[in-house]
Image (cartoon, rainbow, N blue to C red):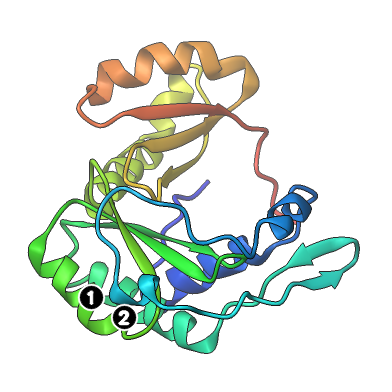
Amino acid sequence: MTSFRLTGRALAALLIAAALSGCAGQKAAADEAGAPPPTLDGAATPGCGLARPTPSPIETAGSTMWPTSASLDDLLGRIGTAGESRFAEHFAGLEVVPEKGHAIVYRVPSADFDAFVQREAGDECVYLRDAAFGRSTLQALADKVINDSAYWRKQGIQINSTSAGNDGTAVTVGVLPADVARARVELPKRYGTAVPIIIEEQEPIRAW
């Protein structure tokens, strides 16, 4: 039972891999790949106003995937590294939208962090969206819950995992299906409600 935490380039690499993973619903997104990026709350880098080629999808094993450019990959690595060090109070997470060729940075509004992203982005398109909490705040709570696993077992609640949401909204806690209802009542009693806790049904994580 561990709390999942990634830093720097590892964070960006995992997010990119997740965004590239094939799923049945991606076929519909392919039909819209030529459309301009959606209007998002917050700021955008100048590259979002530039014409750019539509990413070419890759069909494999019945799924549609879009590769992320090396330049965008490198940019997200730099943003992730700076976000978890220099701007830890503001940086929440990253999201890649490979079929559109852009990325999203979630952050607690910060003129300095926004200026950093704008400066680093070059011609890449990155949207900056508001987050309620920085990753460091959410991760601190996620770590606290997972470190209290022994306590919760004594209370009859099995904590399987915790994670800090990339969009800066909440901490997600996975518990056994039978424990969901009680966990939704008991965890806020112990940790308060200042930071939202989302309780999800999750079977035990088995080591192979």
Disc 1 and disc 2 in contact, CB within 8 angstroms: yes
User: Which residue appears at 73% of the width and 54% of the height?
Assistant: 26
Q: Is residue 183 left or right of residue 47?
A: right
The single residue placed furthest to the right in the displayed view is 61
Q: In this view, does 144 lie above or below 34?
A: above
User: Which residue appears at 46% of the width and 80% of the height?
Assistant: 72
- Residue 25 at what x, y percent from top left? 75, 47
- Residue 8 at what x, y percent from top left? 36, 74
Quadrant occupied by the C terminus: bottom right
- Residue 12 at what x, y percent from top left? 45, 71
User: Which residue appears at 44% of the width and 66% of the height?
Assistant: 103
* Mark 2: few/some/many CA within 10 Å (<14, 14-19, 20+): many
Nearer the observer, 124 or 6: 124
Disc 2 marks a residue whose amino acid type is Ala
What is the distance, in whole Å, between disc 1 and disc 2 at their CAs?
Answer: 5 Å
Q: Is residue 46 left or right of residue 32?
A: left
User: Which residue appears at 23% of the width and 44% of the height?
Assistant: 133
Disc 1 marks a residue whose amino acid type is Gln
Q: Mark 1 points at which residue?
A: 118
Q: Mark 2 points at which residue?
A: 121
* Mark 1: few/some/many CA within 10 Å (<14, 14-19, 20+): many
Circle number at residue 49: none
